[in-house]
Image: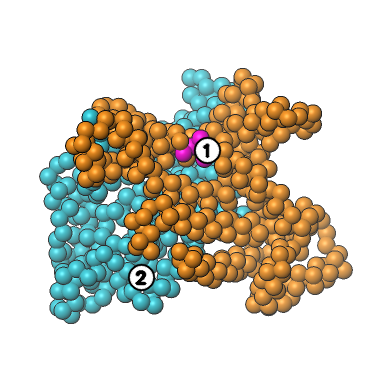
C-alpha cells in the first residue's frame, strides 16, 4: 500500500507543476499592460512602473519567471496581494476553512439523503414508486444550484424573513456558546441546502444504479435462499455493497467542490475560496488567482488519492488486485 | 425494449462511412421509444423550434426599452418587464438561441477534440497514449468553472471565446470515454482482419472502429451540452457573458439587484435553464437505457 501511495504521489508532482506552468503561461498571454491592470484606472508613474517591473521581474523571459515562481513556491511564498493588502498564502488559509465548512455541511446532508432515496427507489417492488422517484430526482437535478439559492433567498429570507440573505455571520455578534452555534447554523442553512439538493439528487441516481447492480449479484440470491428477511438483506447486504461506489464518487465530488463552489458562494456572499477567486479575477489580482487554482488542483489530487486508498482498504477485492 | 435497439447492440463490420450515420439514426429512434428519452426529445425539439422561430414568437424586440420598467406579469408582458423596461418573455425566447448554440457548439467541439485525442491515444497506444492522456489529465485536474472563468475574465467575454473555453474545460471526459472504447475494440478480430487487409490506420479508426464506439459517446455529448448551458448561465450570472448577446444567465445577473421587488426577473429565466437542462438529461437518460443493456427495463426491486 505504501508503494501505491508513493507511486501516485510521484505521478502527481509533475502534473501539479504542469498545471502551474499552464496557468502562468495563460497569464503571460493576456493582452494588455500588467502594471496598468494592477492599479486599475489610475495613472501610473514611471517610477512605480519601474519598481513593479523590477519586483515582479516582468522584464525577465518566461522560463526565468516560471523558475522564480517555483523557487518561491517551495519556500511557501505565494506572493503578496496588493488588492487585499495581505500575503496570498494568508488569504488562502483564511478562506479555505470556510469553503471546507460549507462543503462538509452540504455533503453531510447530501450523502445520507442520496443513499436513502437511491435505496428506496432501487429496492421498492413497486415500479410506479421507482419511476416517480427517478424522474423527480432527474428534474430536481436540472435546477442550477445558484438559481435555487436565489429562489431560496427570495422565498425564505426576503419574503418570510426566516434566514439571513447573505454572509457567514452578523456584522456584530454578542452571542456566546450554544447561541453562537445556532447563529452560525442560521447563516449556513440556505447555502448548504442549495448545495445539498443538487449533489443529493445526483447521489440518489448513482445509488439507485448501484443498488440495482448489487441486487443482481449471486449473494443476494443466497441470502434470500437462506430465508433472510427483506429488511435484513437490504441492511446487511445491499446497503453496504452499494454504498461503496457512491462514497468514491462523493469523494471525487468533494475535491472538485473545494475549488468550485464559485457560483453558490457568490449568491450567498459566503466568504470562501470561490468568492475570493471571483473577486481576484475581477480585480486582476493575478497572484491570488494563481494561488486559488493551485489550491484547487492540490485539493483534487490529494482527495482523489485519499479516496483511492480508502477504497482499496474498504474493498478487499480491490486490495488484492493492487 | 424494441427489436431495432437490440439489432444495434450487435457488432457489425461496417464497410461504408454511412454506417456511422445509420448507427446514430437507429440509436435516436431507439431513444424515442424510452419514456425519458421521448420526453427529453420532445422538450429539445420544442426548444429548437422556439430558437429557430424566435422572431415570430417573441412579441417585442428583446432589446427595445420601454418606459414600463419592473412591470409584473400581465397580458401585455406575460413574464413582466425588467429594470429598463425590456419584455422578459421576448428575452427568454431569444435566450433560447444563445443557450442552444452554446450547448450544441461546445458539445460538438468537445466531441471533435476529445474524440480525436481519445481515438489516437486508444488506437496507437504507447508514447502517443501516454502524452495525450497526460494532457487530458492535466485539464481534468482543474474545476471546470475555474478554468472557464479564468479564460473569459482575462481574455474577454466574446461569445465564441466562451464556447472555446467551455470546450477546453470539458473535452477530457469525452477523450477518456472514446479512449476506453478504442482500447476495448482495437484488439478485436475484425480490426485484425482490417489490418491484414492492409487498410490504412485512418480507415480503420474512422470506418471500422467509429461505428462500434459511437453509442456511449452520444450519451456524453448530451450531458456535455447540459454542462455547457449551465456554465454559460453561471458566467452570465457573474456578469461575465457577452454583453451583446441575450442570455438566460445574464437575465439572472440583472435580477439579482431587484430580487425584493421583481421576482419574475429571476423565476422565468431560471425556469428556462431548468427546462433545457432537464430536457438534455432526460434525453441522455433514455439514450443510456438504449446503450447500456443493464439499465434496460427494470431490473431492480426486492420483494
Label 1 crowd bin: few (<14), some (14–19), many (20+), radius 10 Å: some
Q: Nearer the viewer, residue A27 or A196?
A: A196
Coloring scheme of the render? by chain
Chain A image colour: orange
Where does label 1 land, which residue?
A: A108
Quadrant in which residue B287 is drawn? top left
Do pointers 2 and 1 mark residues of a single chain? Answer: no
Q: Mark 2, chain letter?
A: B
Q: Is residue B190 left or right of residue A175?
A: left
Q: Is residue B183 left or right of residue B246?
A: left
Range drawn in magenta = A107-111
Q: Residue at x 61, y 45 (%)?
A: A100
User: Where does the image place residue B86, in percent across and percent down from the top left?
Assistant: 57, 32
Where does label 2 land, which residue?
A: B121
From the rendered image, report the letter of the chain displayed in cyan: B
Q: Quadrant of the N terminus of chain B?
A: top left
Q: Nearer the viewer, residue B127 or A94?
A: A94
Q: Residue at x 52, y 70 (%)?
A: A10
Amino acid at each position: 500500500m505504501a508503494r501505491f501511495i508513493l507511486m501516485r504521489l510521484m505521478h502527481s508532482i509533475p502534473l501539479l507543476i504542469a498545471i502551474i506552468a499552464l496557468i502562468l503561461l495563460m497569464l503571460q498571454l493576456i493582452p494588455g499592460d500588467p502594471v496598468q491592470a494592477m492599479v486599475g484606472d489610475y495613472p501610473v508613474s514611471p517610477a512605480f512602473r519601474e519598481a513593479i517591473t523590477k519586483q515582479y521581474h516582468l522584464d525577465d523571459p518566461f522560463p526565468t519567471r516560471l523558475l522564480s515562481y517555483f523557487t518561491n513556491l517551495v519556500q511557501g511564498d505565494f506572493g503578496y496581494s496588493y488588492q487585499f493588502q495581505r500575503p496570498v498564502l494568508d488569504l488562502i488559509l483564511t478562506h479555505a476553512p470556510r469553503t471546507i465548512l460549507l462543503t462538509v455541511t452540504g455533503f453531510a446532508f447530501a450523502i445520507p439523503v442520496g443513499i436513502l432515496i437511491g435505496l428506496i427507489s432501487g429496492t421498492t417492488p413497486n415500479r410506479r414508486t421507482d419511476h416517480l422517484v427517478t424522474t423527480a430526482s432527474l428534474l430536481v437535478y436540472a435546477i442550477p444550484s445558484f438559481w435555487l439559492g436565489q429562489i431560496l433567498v427570495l422565498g425564505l429570507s426576503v419574503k418570510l424573513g426566516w434566514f439571513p440573505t447573505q454572509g457567514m455571520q452578523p456584522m456584530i455578534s454578542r452571542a456566546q456558546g450554544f447561541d453562537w452555534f445556532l447563529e452560525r447554523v442560521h447563516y449556513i442553512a440556505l447555502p448548504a441546502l442549495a448545495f445539498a439538493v443538487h449533489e443529493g439528487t445526483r447521489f440518489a441516481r448513482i445509488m439507485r444504479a448501484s443498488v440495482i447492480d448489487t441486487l443482481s449479484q449471486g449473494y443476494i440470491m443466497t441470502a434470500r435462499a437462506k430465508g433472510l428477511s427483506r429488511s435484513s438483506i437490504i441492511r446487511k447486504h445491499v446497503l453496504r455493497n452499494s454504498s461503496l461506489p457512491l462514497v468514491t464518487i462523493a469523494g471525487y465530488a468533494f475535491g472538485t467542490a473545494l475549488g468550485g463552489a464559485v457560483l453558490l458562494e457568490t449568491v450567498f456572499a459566503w466568504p470562501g475560496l470561490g468568492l475570493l477567486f471571483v473577486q481576484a479575477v475581477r480585480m486582476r489580482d493575478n497572484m491570488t488567482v494563481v494561488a486559488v487554482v493551485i489550491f484547487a488542483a492540490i485539493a483534487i489530487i490529494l482527495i482523489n488519492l485519499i479516496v483511492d486508498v480508502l477504497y482499496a482498504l474498504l474493498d478487499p477485492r480491490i486490495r488484492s488486485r493492487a | 425494449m424494441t427489436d431495432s435497439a437490440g439489432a444495434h447492440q450487435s457488432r457489425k463490420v461496417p464497410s461504408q462511412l454511412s454506417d456511422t450515420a445509420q448507427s446514430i439514426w437507429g440509436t435516436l429512434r431507439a431513444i424515442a421509444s424510452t419514456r425519458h428519452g421521448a420526453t427529453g426529445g420532445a422538450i429539445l425539439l420544442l426548444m429548437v423550434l422556439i430558437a429557430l422561430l424566435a422572431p415570430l414568437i417573441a412579441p417585442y424586440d428583446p432589446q427595445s426599452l420601454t418606459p414600463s420598467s419592473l412591470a409584473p406579469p400581465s397580458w401585455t408582458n406575460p413574464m413582466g418587464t425588467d429594470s429598463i423596461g425590456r419584455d422578459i418573455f421576448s428575452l427568454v425566447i431569444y435566450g433560447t438561441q444563445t443557450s442552444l448554440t452554446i450547448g450544441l457548439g461546445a458539445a460538438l467541439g468537445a466531441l471533435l477534440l476529445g474524440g480525436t485525442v481519445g481515438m489516437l491515444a486508444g488506437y496507437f497506444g504507447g508514447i502517443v497514449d501516454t502524452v495525450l492522456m497526460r494532457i487530458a489529465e492535466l485539464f481534468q485536474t482543474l474545476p471546470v468553472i475555474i478554468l472557464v472563468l479564468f479564460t473569459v475574465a482575462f481574455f474577454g467575454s466574446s461569445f465564441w471565446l466562451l464556447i472555446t473555453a467551455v470546450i477546453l474545460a470539458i473535452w477530457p471526459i469525452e477523450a477518456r470515454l472514446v479512449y476506453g472504447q478504442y482500447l476495448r475494440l482495437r484488439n478485436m478480430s475484425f480490426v485484425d482482419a482490417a489490418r491484414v487487409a492492409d487498410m490504412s490506420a485512418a480507415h480503420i479508426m474512422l470506418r471500422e472502429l467509429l461505428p462500434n464506439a459511437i453509442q456511449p459517446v452520444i450519451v456524453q455529448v448530451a450531458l456535455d451540452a447540459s454542462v455547457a448551458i449551465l456554465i454559460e448561465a453561471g458566467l452570465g450570472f457573474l456578469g461575465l457573458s457577452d454583453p451583446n448577446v441575450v442570455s438566460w444567465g445574464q437575465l439572472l445577473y440583472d435580477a439579482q439587484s431587484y430580487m425584493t421587488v421583481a421576482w419574475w426577473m429571476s423565476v422565468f429565466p431560471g425556469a428556462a435553464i431548468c427546462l433545457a437542462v432537464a430536457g438534455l438529461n432526460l434525453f441522455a437518460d433514455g439514450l443510456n437505457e438504449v446503450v447500456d443493456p443493464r439499465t434496460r427495463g427494470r431490473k431492480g426491486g426486492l420483494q
